[in-house]
Image: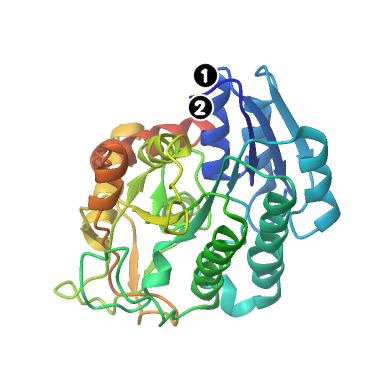
């Protein structure tokens, strides 16, 4: 990494933002982080992540919201970042059905403010989070970046698709390089409690049953491309210093970052039970309740990672056995459960 450059990371107290900031800081980079520390999930987890970042040299934290244009402009004016990584977003497919306003605020207006700032304070590279949800209910697998993505099935997916369109337009008009990353079900220690694997674990220790939205149909179970956090961070890190070049084309590219190895949801759950059993030294079994698939959910996510491999020679490698064991060990330690 170029340690002479200043990195501006939005959503720095978030799951991916925290791990990326930590990795860059450990390499001696200067990182400016912003986060609004909202209470969409347990804020203590966000403070805990920040507590690990604050002692590191070259880290500046700003509590602020990217949907506040002035807050964003002030960061660019004061710190003049060279590379911007936009990871701040209102996440979650199901929550977008209950609370659409926050998705437009954060994911559309917030991202517009970032683009405007990159336009007025030119940057070397803008990297931003998109999502595998842009593929909607595509039947063709694996999902490739060239696939048709005009049929989103949730507002969250629509906001992420709009980010890709907005970034393309700004790259075209103002010639700054931008790279969109379609993340596929990211998991790991200190992850997001709203994600299924984390929620299942919480419910087990609260002696509650878990809901599985696949109608109990094991033949046609939901498939997910689960991607371990370290793989996500390495993929981002490699792309940071490889901005798309212009020439006759627009300097904008989109990449899948997924495991290229989808797992049945039931296999994932069994692996999580085994990992928790290992961490606790006793057998763990979830009590399961099967329900119909929820609106906005898609039956399968499966990433083709050929483009990423071609661009930066990287393909995620962490197995769910290894990744879920890391999560289970962290969870048992962090929450002091027995």
Depth order, front residue of 131/263: 131
Left or right: where 280 falls relative to 70: left
Q: Position of residue 19 (x, y in %)?
A: 52, 35
The answer to which quarter of the image holds residue 214 is bottom left
Q: Position of residue 78 (x, y in %)?
A: 82, 35
- Which residue is denoted by mark 2 in the rendering? 23
- Name the residue at 57% across, 37% down: 18
Q: Position of residue 100 (x, y in %)?
A: 65, 77
- Name the residue at 50% across, 45% down: 191
- Which residue is denoted by mark 1 in the rendering? 27
What colour scheme has been applied to the protein in the rendered image? rainbow
**Residue farthest toward the left in the current orientation of the protein:** 219
Q: Is residue 338 visible?
A: no
Depth order, front residue of 80/8: 80
Q: State how far apart marks 1 and 2 are (Cα).
A: 7 Å
Q: Position of residue 239 (x, y in %)?
A: 42, 40
Q: SS at mark 1?
A: loop
CB under 8 Å between discs 1 and 2: yes
Image mark count: 2
Q: SS at mark 2?
A: helix
Left or right: where 233 falls relative to 301: right
Left or right: where 102 falls relative to 141: right
Q: Quadrant of the C terminus?
A: top left
- Name the residue at 27% across, 64% down: 144
Depth order, front residue of 294/108: 108
């Amino acid at each position: 990494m170029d340690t002479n450059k200043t990195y501006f990371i939005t959503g720095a107290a978030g799951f991916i933002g925290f791990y990326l900031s930590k990795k860059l800081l450990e390499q001696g980079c200067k990182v400016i982080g912003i986060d609004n520390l909202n209470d969409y999930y347990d804020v203590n987890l966000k403070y805990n992540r920040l507590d690990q970042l604050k002692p590191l040299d070259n880290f500046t934290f700003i509590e602020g919201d990217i949907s506040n244009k002035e807050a964003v402009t002030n960061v660019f004016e004061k710190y003049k970042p060279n590379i911007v990584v936009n990871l701040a977003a209102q996440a979650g497919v199901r929550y977008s059905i209950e609370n659409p306003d926050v998705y437009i605020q954060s994911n559309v207006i917030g991202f517009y403010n970032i683009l405007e700032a990159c336009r007025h304070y030119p940057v070397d590279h803008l990297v931003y989070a998109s999502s595998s949800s842009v593929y909607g209910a595509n039947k063709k697998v694996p999902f490739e970046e060239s696939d048709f993505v005009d049929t989103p099935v949730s507002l969250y997916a629509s906001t992420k698709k709009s980010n890709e369109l907005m970034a393309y337009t700004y790259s075209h008009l103002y010639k700054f390089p931008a790279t969109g990353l379609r993340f596929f079900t990211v998991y790991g220690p200190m992850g997001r409690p709203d994600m299924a694997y984390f929620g299942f674990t919480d419910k087990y220790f609260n002696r509650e049953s878990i809901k599985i939205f696949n109608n109990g149909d094991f033949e046609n179970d939901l498939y997910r491309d689960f991607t371990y956090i370290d793989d996500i961070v390495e993929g981002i890190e490699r792309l940071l210093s490889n901005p798309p070049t212009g020439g006759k084309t627009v300097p904008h590219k989109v990449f899948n970052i997924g495991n290229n190895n989808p797992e049945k949801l039931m296999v994932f759950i069994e692996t999580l039970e085994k990992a928790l059993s290992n961490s606790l030294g006793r057998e763990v079994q979830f009590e399961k309740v099967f329900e119909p698939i929820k609106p906005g959910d898609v039956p399968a996510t499966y990433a083709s990672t050929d483009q990423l491999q071609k661009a930066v020679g990287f393909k995620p490698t962490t197995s769910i056995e290894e990744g879920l064991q890391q999560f289970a060990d962290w969870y048992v330690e962090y929450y002091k459960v027995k």
